Image (cartoon, rainbow, N blue to C red):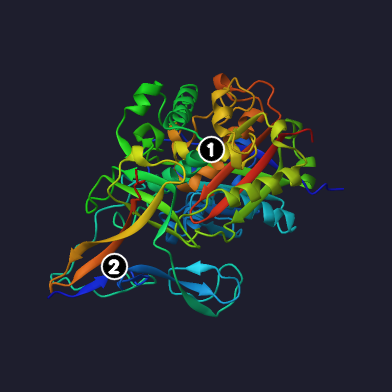
Amino acid sequence: MSSGDIWIIGASMTPFGRHDDKDLIDLAAESALDALGDADVTINDIDILTMGNVYEANSHNGQRLQKQIGQTGIPVYNVVNACATGATALRVALLSIKAGESDIGLAVGVEKMGKGGLIGGAAKKRDARKVYNPSGRYGSVLKTEGILGTGIMPGVFAQAGTEYALAHGVTATHFAKVAQKNHAHSVLNPLAHYRKEFSLDDILNADVIAFPNTLPMCCPNTDGAASVVVVSDAKLKTMDPDVRRRAVKISASVLTSDPWVEGGQVQPDVSTLTRNAAAAAYEQAGVGPEDLDLVELHDCFATAELIHYDNLGLCEPGGAGDFLDSGAPWRDGKTPVNVSGGLLSKGHPLGATGIANIYEVATHLRGEAGERQIAGAKIGLTHVIGLASACAVHILEAGVS
Amino acid sequence: MPGQIPVVDYLVLGDPPHLQARMCAQCDALYFDRRNACAHCGRRDFTWKALASTGQVRGYTQVHRAAPSVPVPYISAIVELDGGGVVKANLLDAQLDDITPGLTVTMTTFVAGVDDDGTEAIAFGYKPVKEQG
């Protein structure tokens, strides 16, 4: 009898970086075919395809991918959910399996970021004559970015970090230490965008983007794709022993959005939905933060990683600074965090990130992470957050099927 | 004499200038934008509430890199207003080092732009309340 568990039997990720010679579908196809090969199946075996992408989401990329790797007539879901897009695509495949509509699914996440990044482009050219007329939901007469504070991503996450700093006494140096760690970790990851260590001084003295985040404390613009193949428990039991041996169990899969909090309308609250997702995931999996052998969390900016130590329960409430100072989130620490290099150094192709985090943890749980392997890893957690606002948390366990 | 217009309609250019919010008639949740319903409790009835001009800085950043049309650097602050309401605006007449837990600020207004009819767009920001002594 099926236990109802869902398993990952194939996972892949392209190198993250600039891929000027490949388009979106090239990257998606590369990772999809690699994941199928890793699972020892073909596109003909797949019952459902889900495709996560943000910037070209109106282009029916799932169907475009099928035209390159196999048009088998299966249902395709094109998914967009900000930076949580990839993880949401995985959940769509997983929900279809749980619903009994599918036995085996392929989830793909892909993004070509271009050079604009997360600070926005030039303003639209104005009409020849400028006359103030209130418009929009706030009756604004001009663009308020930079006049009524900032709403762009480096600033939003900086403000989330300084809110924690004012409440709990962490410093700009604490935030810089996060970036120091993740850049150091990425040196061991052959798929990372950057593989270069930075000293604390290098990071603190680099160009400020939005204080306290300097350039090495902000994720780079990165192209890339990642894919996973997931199956039902019943399907896995029919598969080759070698596939079963390498299978990774999805012990928890949770998606949340923002609950209402005061002030959430002016400053996205990246904490409450993360806390809610983590609590639900720990309950679903029957494990606690103390059981985790590694964590891949959403460090789009260094300030974000530090507050998520607290939001994910990796430290005592208010204790993120002490947790970091103790060395706990380093790869040789108590709870290694972002041993891939994280978004800060590995890169952050929005639609791919959620699945790339799954790829990283699954690879460690299979004992196949090479030089960066966390020895004996059995349980790991992945977290992504997209504004505004979705948070996905998955807990994965090394399988004994 | 040129006219003046607030940059957003939740700024009231009275004497003194102040912010106003839509307040849910059921749960008192506050909103700056035009509402379809309350995001907290779902009710559709709102009243107006005038907000205090003083509050405390809850979070902040100093922006150095922005789109070409936005002058930098500037300090953005999230201010928790006395008596309710949270607002985001620039922190004026202040340095990063001035910002400490519980920093009290007060609202001020400034001209953010002038259109071709000479109408001034009036924006608001916050400046630290200096301790007497």
User: Which corner quadrant of the image does residue B109 belong to?
Assistant: bottom left
Q: Determine which residue is flagged by label 1.
A: A168
Q: Can you say which quadrant of the picture contains the N terminus of chain B?
A: bottom left
Q: Amino acid at mark 2?
A: Val
- State which chain disc 1 sits on: A
Q: Determine which residue is flagged by label 2.
A: B7
Residue in view at x 68 percent, y 57 percent = A96
Find residue A9 and report its horizontal and vertical position in percent.
67, 38
Q: What SS does tag 1 mark? A: helix
User: Which corner quadrant of the image does residue B107 belong to?
Assistant: bottom left
State whether residue A324 is above or below residue A394. above
Residue in view at x 50 percent, y 62 percent = B83
Residue farthest to the right, as pictured: A1
- Bin the neighbour count of mark 1 within 10 Å (Cα to Cα): few under 14, some 14-19, many 20 and up: some
Find residue A120 and report its horizontal and vertical position in percent.
32, 52
Find residue B99 and report its horizontal and vertical position in percent.
38, 42
State whether residue A333 is above or below residue A273. above
Residues at discs 1 and 2 both on one chain: no
State whether residue A178 is above or below residue B77. above
Q: Amino acid at mark 1?
A: His
Q: Is residue A30 visible?
A: no
Q: Nearer the viewer, residue A180 or A185?
A: A180
Q: What SS does tag 2 mark? A: loop
Indicate left or right for A331 with A236 as reference: left
Q: Is residue B2 visible?
A: yes
Q: Give the Cα separation between the discs numbered 1 and 2.
A: 35 Å
Of badges 1 and 2, nearer the viewer stands 1
